[in-house]
Image (spheres, rainbow, N blue to C red):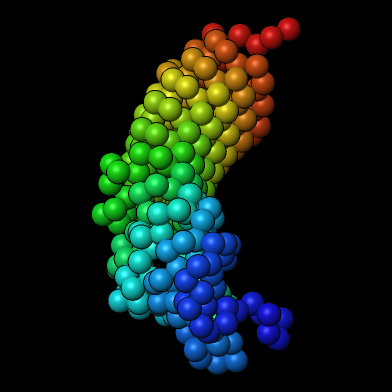
Amino acid sequence: RRFGKLFIAKGLGKLTNLRTLKRFLVCDGKGDIRGCNIRELKDLNKLKEYLSVERLEGGRVKVIDAKDAHLKEKHELIAVELDFKVGKNDIVGSASEQKCLLEALEPPHGIESLAIWDYKGERPVWYLDTNYVELRTLRLQCFPLWATVIGIKSLEKLEVNTCPTLCELPSMPMLKSLNIRSYDGLNTIGDFPNLDWLQVEGCGSLEQLSHGMPALKWLDVYGCYELKTLANMPALEWLEVRYCERLEQVADVHMPD
């Protein structure tokens, strides 16, 4: 920590036997805060468990350097977080620049959890890769260009926050927990036969939840002003509905005494 700010010291890439690195803060070598280029990750292929790569925005990272980080080769990682959050004095990159950068930061196929924050680009090609068969948890926050989330068969937990163009959530057979917030365009939620926990907040265009949620036990709905019907939830044990003024019908919802 220097002058109250975090930074990663240069030379980290020489620690080739390093097993644990929770956070990697990208530095560009300019101004008062100096530190690691993302290339320092290149030979750290023994990293285990969780890695968060932060400060990707602001013009700090070149695509060629992101490719040299060889994130895909860190096979012992099980959780990866990529943070494009813009700082106070950062340069905001274009959507195409961010897409190229995320494309270069392809995670290893064995990860169980992936989180991406404040990403302005379109879906990278690797997101469609069917080799991510171990992925259980996916968190996406502030994605202004994504209209849909591709169904991932192995996924058990999905959190999607502030994606204004999102209009569809397809069926995912293994999904157990779903948290969706701030999607004025969302009008369709697919069938989730194993879903038991659902929180929906600020989805102004959503009129009806899917009928294909037979295992749902916990439901919290907030600020869905067009929602008219809640139906066919035979396993429901807990229900809270707030600021859904147009809700007309609650049918086939069997709550315990």
Quarter of the image for the C terminus: give it.
top right
Q: Residue furthest front?
A: 17
| Residue 208 location (% of width, % of height) | 46, 25
| Residue 209 location (% of width, % of height) | 47, 25
| Residue 192 location (% of width, % of height) | 43, 24
Q: Residue at x 66, y 32 (%)?
A: 242
Q: Residue at x 39, y 26 (%)?
A: 173
Left or right of 90? Residue 170 is left
**Looking at the picture, does residue 206 appear above or below residue 2?**
above
**Looking at the picture, does residue 72 appear above or below residue 199?**
below
Q: How many marks?
A: 0
**Looking at the picture, does residue 187 appear above or below residue 117?**
above
Q: Residue at x 62, y 30 (%)?
A: 220
Left or right of 93? Residue 14 is right
Quarter of the image for the N terminus: give it.
bottom right
**Looking at the picture, does residue 246 appear above or below residue 107?**
above
Q: Is any part of residue 138 visible from this angle?
A: no
Q: Is any part of residue 80 visible from this angle?
A: yes
Looking at this view, is 93 or 223 the one in front?
93
